[in-house]
Image (cartoon, grey):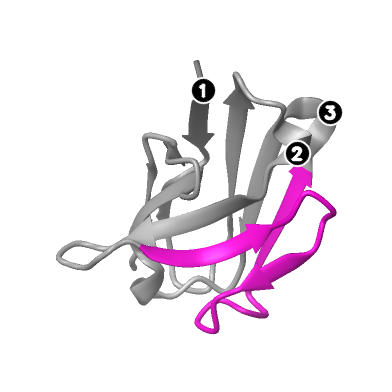
Amino acid sequence: QVQLVESGGGLVQPGGSLTLSCAASGIIFSAYVMGWYRQAPGKQREWVATIQDNGITNYAGSVKGRFTISRDNAKNTVYLQMNSLKPEDTAVYYCGNPGYNYWGQGTQVTVSS
C-alpha cells in the first residue's frame, strides 16, 4: 500500500521560510518522479515543482528562484524548501505523482502577518 505523508507546514510571515517533507512508503521511491502541488481556497490544484528520478528539477514560474525541491532516496523523502514566502503562496501543499494517482493528505501553509 502506497503512503505519502507530508509534514512541515504552518503559519509564517511574508518573507519567511518553511521546509516541507514528504515521506513515502510502499513504492520503490528512487524510481519515481515526485512532485509538489498546492491548492488554495476556491482554486484548482496546481503544480509547483517536480524532481525526476535522476535529480533533474522543474519549477512553476511563480515559485522559480524561491522554492527548491530535493530528494533523499535513502530516506524515501522528498523536500520543498520555500523561501521569500508571499501571501499568495498560502495553500494546502501536497506531494505526489499524478500519473500513478499517488497523493499525500496535504499540509497547510499560511503566509500572513
- Looking at the rendered image, the quarter that the C terminus falls into is bottom left
User: Is residue 62 rendered magenta in the image?
Assistant: yes
Q: Amino acid at mark 3?
A: Ala
Observer-side mark, 3 or 2, equals 2
Identify the magenta region: 46-71
Between the C-alphas of marks 3 and 2, the distance is: 12 Å
Location of residue 46 in the rendering, given as x and y in whole percent from the top left corner: 38, 66
User: Residue at 61% across / 68% down in the picture?
Assistant: 83
- Is 18 left, or right, of 56 in this rendering? left
Secondary structure of the residue carrying tag 2 is helix
Observer-side mark, 1 or 3, equals 1
User: Residue at 60% across / 18% down in the picture?
Assistant: 26
Location of residue 61 in the rendering, given as x and y in whole percent from the top left corner: 55, 84
Q: Nearer the viewer, residue 97 or 46?
A: 97
Q: Identify the mark nearer the N-term, 1 or 3.
A: 1
> Quadrant location of residue 41?
bottom left
Please say if 23 is above or below 110. above
Q: Nearer the viewer, residue 73 or 6?
A: 73
Q: Residues within 10 Å of mark 2 (few under 14, many from 20)?
A: few
- The reply to whether the C-beta atoms of the residues labelled 1 and 2 are less than 8 Å apart is no
Residue picked out by circle 2: 31
Q: Amino acid at mark 1?
A: Val
Residue picked out by circle 1: 2
For residue 10, the mark is none
Q: Amino acid at mark 2?
A: Ala
Q: Identify the mark nearer the N-term, 3 or 2.
A: 2
> Quadrant location of residue 31?
top right
